Image (cartoon, rainbow, N blue to C red):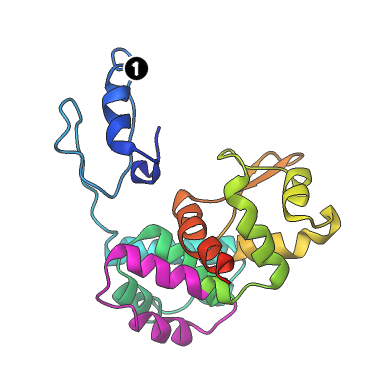
Amino acid sequence: MVDNLETAADYRALVPDLRELVNPTKFLLTSRHSLHDYPGVLCLSLDELSAADSLALLRHEARERGMSDVASAPADTLLQVHAVAGGNPLALKLLVGQIHSLSLSRVVEDLRQAQGRRVEELYRFIYWRSWQLLSDDARRVLAIMPLVAESGGGLAQIAALSELAEEQLAAPLRQLVRLCLVNVRGTVEARRYGVHRLTETFLLNEVLKWQARP
């Protein structure tokens, strides 16, 4: 599987190379760009989640984070998020993370400023809002996550890259996981932490360039 194909340095050249490896191998590619121009690629376009599915996802994410008041909120209240964000699953997860620190009405009102923007701009807006909620240590940890392998990194690696002691990582990682900016993988005995490719793109194209300004 190749997730978020368009984030590859030269994805247009990658697709023909992958075709050489097909039969019997098959590849699942996910991309926000159409691949209809490539022969031998079967394209399936996915629509946004419906209001009902968005509501189910919002409740599920809230329960996963111990936010029982959000999970049990009236449907009309939660559907305000869907009304302004649409049915983009990652966007909905990120917004649930923000509701952990901000009121739902505040999140919705902030998001109304981004209504009508392209999907890329919507994600940029949501990510910057989440970034503003982070502690300095959490920002420091998140900024180094593009250096971690796609499969995730352990505490020792993250500590070395962030130049924070392992005992200093608990609070920032909790905040990053709570805001859906970092994913937890691995086993009970060996946790690994990684980021979604869209999060990585935001960090590389927005945060690191912003930090590099004089």
Quick one: SS at disc 1? loop
Is residue 127 located in the magenta-colored stretch of the structure? yes
Task: Please state which amino acid type lies under the numbered disc 1.
Answer: Thr
Q: Which residue lies furthest to the top in this view?
A: 24
Q: Which residue lies furthest to the front in this view?
A: 214
Query: Would you place residue 173 above or below residue 126 in this image?
Result: above
Q: In this view, does 6 lie to the left or right of 167?
A: left
Identify the residue shown where x is 61% and y is 46%. Answer: 147
Identify the residue shown where x is 32% and y is 24%. Answer: 18
Q: Which quarter shows the N terminus? A: top left
Q: Position of residue 181 (x, y in %)?
A: 56, 60
Residue underneath mark 1: 25
Is residue 115 located in the magenta-colored stretch of the structure? yes
Query: Would you place residue 113 above or below residue 16 in this image?
Result: below
Q: Where is residue 108 in the image (x, y as percent from the top left)?
A: 40, 82
Q: Where is residue 32 in the image (x, y as percent from the top left)?
A: 28, 50
Read off the magenta span.
101-129
Observer-nearest of 103 and 137: 137
Give neighbour class at mark 1: few <14, some 14-19, many 20+ (Cα, 10 Å).
few
Q: Where is residue 111 in the image (x, y as percent from the top left)?
A: 38, 79
Observer-nearest of 19 and 185: 19
Identify the residue shown where x is 85% and y is 57%. Answer: 167
- Prevalent SS, magenta region: helix
- When asked about the image quadrant of residue 30, the answer is top left
Q: Is residue 174 visible?
A: no
Q: Which quarter shows the C terminus? A: bottom right
Query: Would you place residue 56 above or below residue 188 in this image?
Result: below
Q: In this view, does 27 lie to the left or right of 211?
A: left
